[in-house]
Image: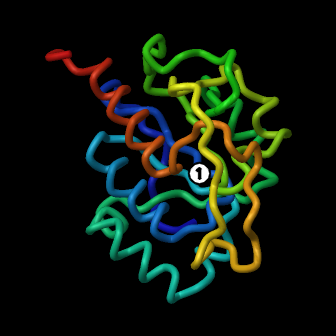
Amino acid sequence: MIGCQQRAADPHAGPTLLLVDLASPINIGMILRVAESFACPVVIAGSGRVLDDPEKMRVVHDFACGALARRGFRHLPLAEIPAFARTGRFLATTIVPGGLILDEYRSEPSDIVALGNEYDGLPAEVASRADIPLCIPMPDIPVPKPPSFSPIEPGRQTVARDGTPNLNVAMAAGIIAFHAYRCRSPAA
């Protein structure tokens, strides 16, 4: 376990953001920063190619802007996701229509919101465990991904459901964390 953060019992805390096998240290760092800002605990499942690499962890540190040192995160082996998912209401982010639209989502402190890998999204075995699929509404326009000059995973150019409207995982986490904050804030 990196850091020592556990699930929040604080009723004013946001949902736990479960990052499943993210490959970009920049995305992980940005999510740690936004999670700290909106009081969302972070659990990272998998992502060994980032967490086990000192150079990539320096990038996480830089993009977390101090949140890594202040709040940390809990590391979870991928095999433990099923048990962890049963500790709260489990929401799986999706870009496939038919899930709960973010505007209708009302955050509970025990919620776990799973966000998937930059290329593939959530693995089917994780998404299938969801109590609720969660979708950020987007315009229905084609957005194919051109080849990268510097891909997150060298040698890989394809993404799942290429062309389907989607957001960068750090952007999606920020939107969800902000929405959950607004829903629990007395000023909302």
| Amino acid type, mark 1 | Leu
Determine whether 168 is above or below 15 in the image: below
Residue extending furthest left?
A: 187
Q: Is residue 73 left or right of residue 81?
A: left
Residue at image coords 58%, 31%? 141
Q: Which residue is the extreme one toward the bottom?
A: 55
Quarter of image, res 125: top right
The image quarter containing residue 134 is top right
Image quadrant where one finds the C terminus = top left
Q: Quadrant of residue 147?
A: bottom right
Rendering coords of residue 175 (x, y %): 39, 36
Which one is nearer the viewer's eye here, 117 or 73? 117
Q: Position of residue 43 (x, y in %)?
A: 55, 51
Residue 27 image point, x, y percent: 48, 61
Q: Position of residue 64 (x, y in %)?
A: 34, 65
Return the residue found at the far right.
125
Quadrant the N terminus occupies: bottom right
Give the SS element for disc 1.
strand
Asked if residue 179 lies left or right of residue 104, the reply is left
Residue drawn at (68%, 59%), measured in percent from left and top? 21
Q: Residue at x 53, y 16 (%)?
A: 101
Residue on which disc 1 sits: 19
Q: Is residue 86 above or below residue 65?
A: above
Left or right, residue 9 beside residue 83: left
User: 181 or 5: nearer the eye?
Assistant: 181
What crowding class fits label 1: few (fewer than 14 Cα within 10 Å), some (14-19), or many (20 or more)?
Answer: many
